């Protein structure tokens, strides 16, 4: 019997983790700079939270959730996204009562969706996201968008495109909905069964269909932007003007409708335009969700957020040929010849590590040459070789493997030397 990772999941091996850690540290840093404080919620929630928070008619709820019954007979679901949980926690902990408004949250962690496996689509993937809850100021829409753009720019990506749309308010959506039904109804038989179901329940979602997106009626469908109420239109203009102030380019994309049910007003996606990125080019999606907090039992409070996956960010880096600078090198490798020398090495390693100097040695009784090779493979910056002579003299030659430079030092001098030179 041999075991493999479950389909759609991956092991991130020690060679790859430095890259992940680097991205994660950039994300944490940006969250700090924009002041979106981290929230950590459970990886599973009551199933109903997602049914209500993500929406019954979405692909996520209809096809992609990992739902199970626990031993107490409760229906639980591995979280497929982070917004519903963040908002649940916001309501449960009455964050709307805090004097600091809006409440700005960020999260990072694995999400689970039963997806068809393909490049850029996993069944477990890591999302970073933010939520700003408690403000309907278009300036915060621009802040959220600029944070998302900043993520990609901070890792060095250049081939990016920001797609922007407004889904308007309720009045906009109702008028548009009627127009959509009239538009699609006569030919709905030509569409997939999902779309047929969507027609009455949530016709907007037809525009987001992955099966029928080439159908000619899609391009000619009534556009939300033509139905914006005066108020929605003013709101949209303000968001755009703040983006102009920030120097962020965007393209208004009237066909952009987000997959989740609770969006209104601002919706955006960031795409990679790198050649060779593959079929799925969306790196990040977000938007405003003014009805969500109330929809899951809180007060009528507006919100906006986005989510992106680290997997797709890394794919975009690959597509642009960008190598992140990561720290994975070893400061010093200690080669020991003989039992006494080994004791000295153990002692030295402990003194190095106590000062934050990364250090390693041989534990499988290799010959000197093999130990040197090992030091090389580990990318050790310095190497010392301890044998009888060194023990007698209490000093050792330390070699800088990058420059070839060697210096003779007393054992006691090593720590300071390394702190200054590593
Ligand atoms: P898509 O249309 O690609 O299915 P979505 O609308 O389901 O995207 P969201 O729920 O908005 O995506 O998630 C936000 C971001 O999370 C996406 O833009 C993408 O970067 C990432 N993402 C979504 N699903 C996956 C997945 N299965 N594997 C890896 N990343 C994902
Ligand atoms: Mg999806």
Image (cartoon, grey):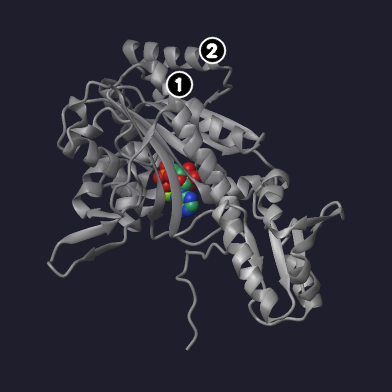
In the rendered image, which quarter is residue 359 located in?
A: bottom right
Q: Position of residue 131 (x, y in %)?
A: 35, 33
Q: Is residue 401 above or below residue 40?
A: below
Name the residue located 67 percent from the left edge and 41 percent from the top edge: 274
- Work out whether residue 316 or residue 269 is closer to the camera in this orientation and state it: 316
| CB contact under 8 Å: marks 2 and 1 | yes
Residue ID for mark 2? 245
Judged from the image, the secondary structure of the residue bearing numbered disc 1 is: helix
Q: Position of residue 64 (x, y in %)?
A: 35, 57
**From where the camera sits, is residue 127 visible?**
yes
Judged from the image, the secondary structure of the residue bearing numbered disc 2 is: helix
- Give the side of residue 272 with respect to residue 366, left or right: left
Q: Earlier in the sequence, mark 2 or mark 1?
A: 1
- Work out whether residue 321 or residue 55 is closer to the camera in this orientation and state it: 321
Name the residue located 41 percent from the left edge and 28 percent from the top edge: 35
In the rendered image, which quarter is residue 420 located in?
A: top right
- Judge the density around disc 2: few (<14), some (14-19), many (≥20) Cα neighbours within 10 Å: few
Residue ID for mark 1? 142
**From where the camera sits, is residue 190 visible?**
no
Name the residue located 35 percent from the left edge and 53 percent from the top edge: 193
Q: Position of residue 82 (x, y in %)?
A: 34, 44
Q: Is residue 193 above or below residue 73?
A: above
């Amino acid at each position: 019997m041999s075991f493999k990772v479950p389909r759609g999941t991956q092991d991130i091996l020690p060679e790859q983790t430095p890259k992940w850690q680097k991205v994660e540290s950039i994300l944490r840093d940006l969250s700090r700079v924009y002041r979106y404080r981290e929230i950590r919620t459970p990886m599973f929630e009551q199933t109903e939270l997602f049914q209500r928070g993500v929406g019954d008619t979405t692909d996520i709820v209809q096809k992609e959730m990992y739902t199970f019954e626990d031993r107490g007979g409760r229906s639980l679901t591995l979280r497929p996204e982070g917004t519903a949980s963040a908002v649940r926690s916001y309501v449960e902990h009455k964050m709307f009562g805090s004097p600091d408004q809006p409440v700005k949250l960020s999260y990072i962690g694995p999400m689970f969706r039963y997806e068809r496996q393909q490049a850029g689509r996993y069944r477990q993937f890591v999302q970073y996201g933010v939520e700003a809850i408690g403000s309907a100021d278009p300036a915060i829409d621009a802040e959220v968008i600029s944070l998302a753009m900043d993520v990609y720019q901070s890792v060095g990506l250049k081939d990016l495109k920001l797609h922007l749309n407004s889904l308007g308010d309720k009045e906009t959506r109702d008028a548009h909905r009627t127009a959509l039904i009239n538009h699609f109804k006569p030919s709905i038989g030509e569409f997939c069964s999902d779309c047929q179901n969507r027609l009455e329940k949530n016709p907007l979602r037809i525009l987001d269909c992955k099966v029928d997106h080439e159908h000619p009626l899609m391009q000619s469908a009534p556009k939300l932007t033509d139905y914006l109420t005066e108020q929605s239109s003013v709101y949209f203009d303000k968001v755009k003007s703040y983006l102009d102030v920030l120097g962020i380019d965007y393209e208004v994309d009237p066909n952009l409708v987000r997959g989740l049910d609770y969006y209104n007003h601002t919706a955006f996606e960031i795409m990679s335009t790198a050649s060779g990125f593959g079929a799925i080019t969306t790196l990040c999606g977000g938007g405003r969700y003014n009805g969500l907090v109330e929809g899951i039992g809180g007060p009528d409070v507006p919100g906006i957020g986005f989510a992106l996956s680290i997997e797709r960010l890394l794919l975009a880096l690959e597509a642009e040929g960008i190598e992140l600078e990561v720290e994975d090198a070893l400061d010093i490798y200690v080669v020991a010849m003989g039992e006494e020398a080994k004791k000295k090495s153990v002692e030295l390693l402990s003194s190095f590590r106590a000062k934050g100097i990364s250090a390693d040695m041989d534990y499988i009784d290799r010959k000197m040459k093999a130990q040197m090779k090992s030091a090389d493979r580990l990318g050790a910056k310095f190497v010392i070789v301890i044998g009888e002579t060194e023990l007698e003299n209490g000093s050792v030659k330390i070699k800088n493997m990058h420059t070839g430079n060697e210096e003779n030092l007393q054992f006691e001098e090593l720590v300071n030397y390394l702190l200054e030179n590593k």
